Amino acid sequence: MPKGVPLPENVPDDGLTTRQRRNAPVLAVHTGPGKGKSTAAFGMALRAWNQGFDIGVFQFVKSAKWKVGEEAAFRALGDLHTATGVGGPVQWHKMGEGWSWTRKKGSDEDHAQIALEGWQEIARRIANEEHRFYVLDEFTYPLKWGWVDVDEVVRVLRDRPGNQHVVITGRDAPQALIDAADLVTEMTKVKHPMDAGRKGQRGIEW
Amino acid sequence: MPKGVPLPENVPDDGLTTRQRRNAPVLAVHTGPGKGKSTAAFGMALRAWNQGFDIGVFQFVKSAKWKVGEEAAFRALGDLHTATGVGGPVQWHKMGEGWSWTRKKGSDEDHAQIALEGWQEIARRIANEEHRFYVLDEFTYPLKWGWVDVDEVVRVLRDRPGNQHVVITGRDAPQALIDAADLVTEMTKVKHPMDAGRKGQRGIEW
C-alpha cells in the first residue's frame, strides 16, 4: 500500500540542499490521447489552492463551454478565498470567449493571433510572478500548429523567476517541451464509452 | 482545436435511445504507473459537484495524510453546498484514520479486514443509491492483494441500480474490472522529478 512520498531513486550531485530541491518549481506536461490530461491538471490545482497558492488558469480552447464544471468549482473556491481567506485566489481565463483582458473574440482567422496574445500575457505574468500555479490548458495545440513558438515558450519557462509551477495539457506535446519538463505523464485510452456509441453526459463530460 | 463533445465512432444496435445512452451510469478506471490517476478522478468529481451530484469519496490508503489538498478543497465545496445550496454534498472517508462509520484503526494485521469493511459499506450504499458519484481511490490494491473479491466487486458494480457513477483508481487494475468498465485510462510515467532526485513539495505532491 502506498506510504507517503516515495524515496528518490537517486540523489543528484547538483550542490543543492534537500530544502532547495523541495522548493524547485515544477513544469508538468500531461499529454497523450487518453482522458484525464486537463482533469488531472485541475486536480493538481486543488492542492495548490489548499496551500494558498495564487492560481491562474488559461484555456486555449475554441469553445467557451469546455470544462464549465471545473470552472464553476474553481470560481466557487476563489470566491471562498475572497470571502474567508481560506485557500488561494483563482483567476480563470478562456480564449474561447475572448481573453478577459481584451474581450476580443475575433473571427476564425484570428485564432492564431488570439492564441499568441494569450501566451504573451502569460509570459508577462510569469516575468512579474503574478501567479504561483499556472494551468495552460490545451496549450499544446497552438504550439503544434505553429501559432506560438515552442523555443520561446521553453526559454520563458526555463528562465522563469521565483517559484512558479506550470502545468501544460494537450495531445502531441512537442519534444522540446517534454525535454524541458520535470514531470511528464502520458494518458493512454484503453477503453472509452463513446467507442460503444455511448453519449457524453452531464457530470461526466461537462 | 477540440470542439465540444466528439461524435461517437459508431452507434450501437442496442435498442436504446440517445437519451438512454446519455444517461447510462459510467464505471471509470484510472490505472497505470504514472501520476494523475487519483488527481483526474478528483477533477471528474469537480464536474459532478457542479452538477449537484451527491459525492462519496472512499480512500483505500494506509496513511491518513494522503491527498489532504484535494480533501480540504472538497470539504470546502461540500460546506459551500450546505451553506448556499450551490453544487452537491460531499462525503470523504479514509481507511487510513479508520472509516468514519467505525473509527476502527486496527493494527497492521487488520488492514485486510478494514479494507473489506470499507467495500461492504460501499456495496450497501450502492444498493441504497446513497451517492450519485463515487471515488474509490487506490481501490485496486485491496483487489490485487485479495483482500476484496474482484468478482463480487464486478457483480455489484455491474448490477448497481439507478444512475450512479463510479471511478476507481490505482495501479494494476484487475482484468475483470477493466472488462467491466466503460472508461479505462492508463497513466504512463514519461518523466518524473523524483527520478532526478527532486523532492516532493507542498502544493504539488500534497
Image (cartoon, coloured by chain):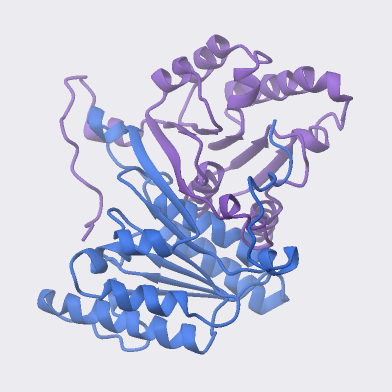
Chain colours: A blue, B purple
Q: Is residue B194 left or right of residue A97?
A: right
- Vertical comparison of B95 with B198: above or below: above
Q: Nearer the viewer, residue A48 or B82?
A: A48
Task: Classify residue B62 by image quadrant.
Answer: top right
**Farthest residue in the left direction?**
A109
- Vertical comparison of B64 with A38: above or below: above
Task: Classify residue A45 by image quadrant.
Answer: bottom right
Q: Quadrant of the C terminus of chain B?
A: bottom right
Tell me, yes or no, if residue A65 can be seen here: no
- Vertical comparison of B200 with B156: above or below: below
Tell me, yes or no, if residue A183 can be seen here: yes
- Vertical comparison of B158 with A51: above or below: above
Q: Is residue B107 left or right of residue A76?
A: right
Q: Quadrant of the N terminus of chain B?
A: bottom left
Q: Nearer the viewer, residue A160 or B87?
A: A160
The location of residue B112, given as percent across then percent down, is 75, 18
The location of residue A142, given as percent across then percent down, is 24, 69
Q: Residue at x 33, y 64 (%)?
A: A176
Tag count: 0
Q: Residue at x 40, y 72 (%)?
A: A58
Q: Nearer the viewer, residue B188 or B177?
A: B188
